[in-house]
Image (cartoon, grey):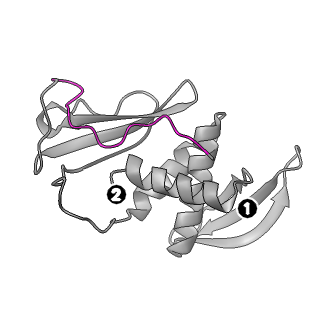
Amino acid sequence: MTEYDIGGPGRVCAATGRPLNPGDAFHAALADRDGKLVRTDFAADAWPGPPPGAVAHWSGRVPAADRPRKPVVNDDLLLDCLDRLKGSAGADGRNFRYVAALLLMRRKRLRFEDAARDADGRDVLILRDAKGGAVHQVTDPRLTDAEVAAAQAEVFRVLGWA
C-alpha cells in the first residue's frame, strides 16, 4: 500500500504557533521537499505567500470536527498540482500526480487521448485538458486498486477535502 508522509489539515499556524479553530480562515501550501510532499497551514492574517517549491496553495475555513462534510473538489487546484509535479522524482509526487489525473478524468476535465510507453517501458497516459486544450503525459505508477483508493483518500485528506 502506498504511504504518504504528508500531514492533513493542521490546527496550528506555522508562522505564529497560534491554534486554528473551527471557522477560522486559513491558507495552506503543499511543497515538494527532498522528494516528499509537505503540507503547511497558516492563519489567514499570517500568510506569507506560497513557500519555495510550492506545488499548490489554497485557502479555506477550518471545519468543525463533528460536522460531516461532502468533499468539494477544486479542478483547477488538481490541475495545478498535476502541472507542478510534472518532473517529480519521488514516488509520492508521481503517485499524487497520477491520482490527480484520474480524478480529473473522472470529473471530465481531462480526456483520454492515447497511451504510449516511455523509454523505460512504463505506460504513459496522454490526456487533453477539456477547457484549455493542453496535453498532459502522466506515467502510470502501476498502483493496485487498493493503492489508488488509498492515494485518492490521501489526496483528499492532504488538500482538506475529506
Q: Is residue 78 left or right of residue 12?
A: right
Q: Is residue 65 left or right of residue 55?
A: left
Q: Residue 113, labelled with which disc?
A: none
Quadrant location of residue 16?
top left
Query: In the rendered view, would you say 32 is above or below 66?
Result: above
Relative image position of residue 61 (x, y in whole percent) = 17, 51
Magenta extent: 2-16
Q: Tell me if mark 2 has few (under 14), some (14-19) or many (20+) residues whose alpha carbon lies within 10 angstroms of its own.
A: some
Front: mark 2 or 1: 2
Relative image position of residue 106 (x, y in whole percent) = 55, 73
Q: Residue at x 72, y 72 (%)?
A: 113
Q: Tell me if mark 1 has few (under 14), some (14-19) or many (20+) residues whose alpha carbon lies within 10 angstroms of its own.
A: some
Q: Residue 125, labelled with which disc?
A: 1
Q: What amino acid type should be assigned to the residue bearing mark 1?
A: Leu
Estimate the spatial distance between the alpha carbons at disc 2 and disc 1, rounded to whole Å: 26 Å
Quadrant location of residue 124?
bottom right
Q: Residue 161, labelled with which disc?
A: 2
